[in-house]
Amino acid sequence: MDWLERTATLRQWARDGARAPHKPLLLLYALGRYQADAEGELRYSAVEADLRRLLTEYGPPRRTSPAYPFHHLVSDGVWEVRTDRGPGSPGTGLRELRETGAVGRLAPELRAALRREPQLLARIARLLLDLHFPPSLHRELCEAVGLDLEPTEFERFSAARRQRDRRMREVVLTAYEFRCAFCGYDGRIGALPVGLEAAHVRWWAFEGPDDVDNGLCLCSLHHKLLDKGVLGIGDGHRVVVSQSFVGASTVAREQVISLAGRQLIGPQPGHPPVAEAHRAWHTAQVFHGTPRVTVPAS
């Protein structure tokens, strides 16, 4: 059985590029728990809070119950659920999952494959990360689910998959004149830019093209905050900041909160700005909460 292929084809709700990382998040969490205790089970009532936190932190803005992936992942053949009454899930009702003592774990065949081929765990995890999340979140997400992957285990799944255009970084950074489009940071060591990255507005994992009109030159901090949904791009290509972001320090105010309403820096003439379709995707699928209201200077 090809477990990588099965992982790559998890049944998910999909419409117009909408994100639905609920099953991938549960499977990553289960792999992390398997790595810590290969014989352990995940009692729904004990892991519900963890799963809800993962969905809130790494899922789309719309709220979803962790009961849905806990029940529905069974249909993909990588997960099993049983209750006090015997094998099988009681459904997606929170009360039923809690009161029947529902527990889940990786399917027996998958556990056997992981015992035979220990490196398979890292390959499955890497595939889930590549397919559903931007690179800026991979290591953080591994820590969140308790996965311990060696740097050498962060390998690409298949050369047959769509490949990134390695020229995008140079093209996007040039278009924005090697400055962060949000804050203007332009640090260099000698002639080489440092701490500047080419960010996809519509994530590459969700058919975001390697084009200038889907890219921004951002410093490492603002790239991470864009991918976390703290920052976004509003009407008139102005920065939007989520009201969910809290920071009392001067640095947090200056580097994040004060960006609200600021006009993007760049791109230079001759290069297209971020396309409306990509901006709208990010707003709908990544940006969290409501934009902060900007107060005009007096």
Image: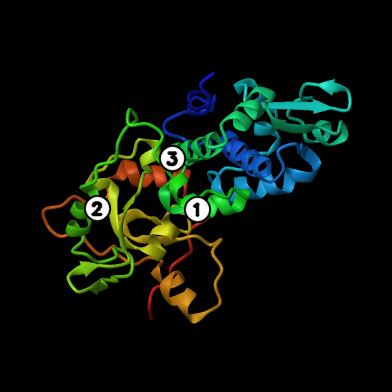
x, y percent for residue 174: 17, 58
As helix, strand or loop, the secondary structure at mark 1 comes to: helix
Contact between marks 2 and 1 (CB within 8 A): the answer is no
- Camera-side residue of 106 and 61: 106
Calculate the distance from the C-alpha at mark 2 to the C-alpha at mark 1: 21 Å
Question: Quick check: can you spot residue 159?
Answer: yes
x, y percent for residue 269: 12, 58
As helix, strand or loop, the secondary structure at mark 3 comes to: helix
Calculate the distance from the C-alpha at mark 3 to the C-alpha at mark 2: 18 Å
N-term-proximal mark, 3 vs 1:
3
- Camera-side residue of 234 and 61: 61
x, y percent for residue 16: 42, 31
N-term-proximal mark, 3 vs 2:
3
Displayed quadrant of residue 101: top right
Residue at the spot x=33%, y=70% of the render? 183
Report whether 293 appears left or right of 62.
left
Instruction: Specify the amino acid type for callout 1.
Output: Arg
Q: Looking at the image, is 222 positioned above or below residue 251? A: above
The residue indicated by pointer 1 is: 139
Tag shown at residue 169: 2
N-term-proximal mark, 2 vs 1:
1
As helix, strand or loop, the secondary structure at mark 2 comes to: helix
Tag shown at residue 44: none
The residue indicated by pointer 3 is: 130
